[in-house]
Image: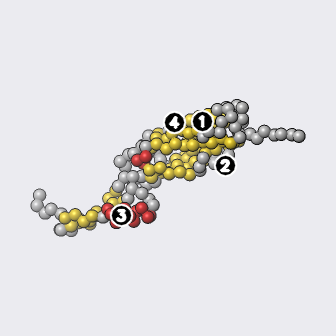
Amino acid sequence: MNIYAQSPVVEFRTSEASVDERDGTYAIEVSVVNPNANPTSVEVYVTQNTATPGTDYNFSSPQTVTFPANSNKTQSVLVTILNNTTTDATRTVEFRLRNTTNDPDIGLDSALLLTIIDDDLAVTQSRISRSTMLIIVQPPSTRESEFREWFTASTFVLPVCNSL
């Protein structure tokens, strides 16, 4: 009877995630399947992005994740999300896995696309007359249902003071 040991497999716990700019950090989780009697490690690194390092996020790339021998406990590395005051579109950062030890296979979820959702407001339209001023602002979320709810609650008509 031949018994073949399966190689360890490392991969991200998910291939896509999103984080609000105000959340502060995001934990990138890496998992291992079929651990064996040796420690297994893999590097997490940034490959491409529309987010700007140092402005939208901080991540020292690469970072090494190490799984102890015989352990399938998920490991994580942190990305710091920077809450700037710049109104910008949704930004993304892609992370990948490389440079393994203990000869594991890299699984199907070998890339993680992290979306950073802006939380800053921008005036997108204004209308001024002699008696009122209407200001419409961009919502802090790009989800349509949240936009409708937020927009309904956030449209204000303000009286204009004519005597300064």
Q: 77 or 138, which lies in front?
A: 77
Residue 37 visible in the snapshot: yes
Left or right placement of residue 88 versus residue 66 in this view: left
Disc 4, SS: loop
Q: Which of the 4 image quarters holds residue 139?
A: bottom left
Considering only vertical position in the picture, is 147 above or below 71? below
* Residue plotted at (22% across, 63% down): 158
Residue furthest right as drawn: 1
Earlier residue among tags 1 and 4? 4
In 3D space, how far apart are the residues under numbered discs 2 and 1 (Cα atoms)?
18 Å
- Residue type for callout 2: Leu
**Residue underneath mark 1:** 65
Disc 2, SS: loop
In 3D space, how far apart are the residues under numbered discs 1 and 3 (Cα atoms)?
43 Å
Disc 1, SS: strand
Whether pointer 4 and pointer 3 mark residues with C-beta atoms closer than 8 Å, the reply is no
Q: Residues within 10 Å of mark 4 (few under 14, many from 20)?
A: few
**Residue underneath mark 4:** 60
Residue 22 in picture, x, y percent from top left: 40, 47
Whether pointer 3 and pointer 2 mark residues with C-beta atoms closer than 8 Å, the reply is no
Q: Which of the 4 image quarters holds residue 67?
A: top right
Whether pointer 1 and pointer 3 mark residues with C-beta atoms closer than 8 Å, the reply is no
**Residue underneath mark 2:** 108
What mark, if any, has residue 151 been given in the picture? 3
Earlier residue among tags 2 and 1? 1
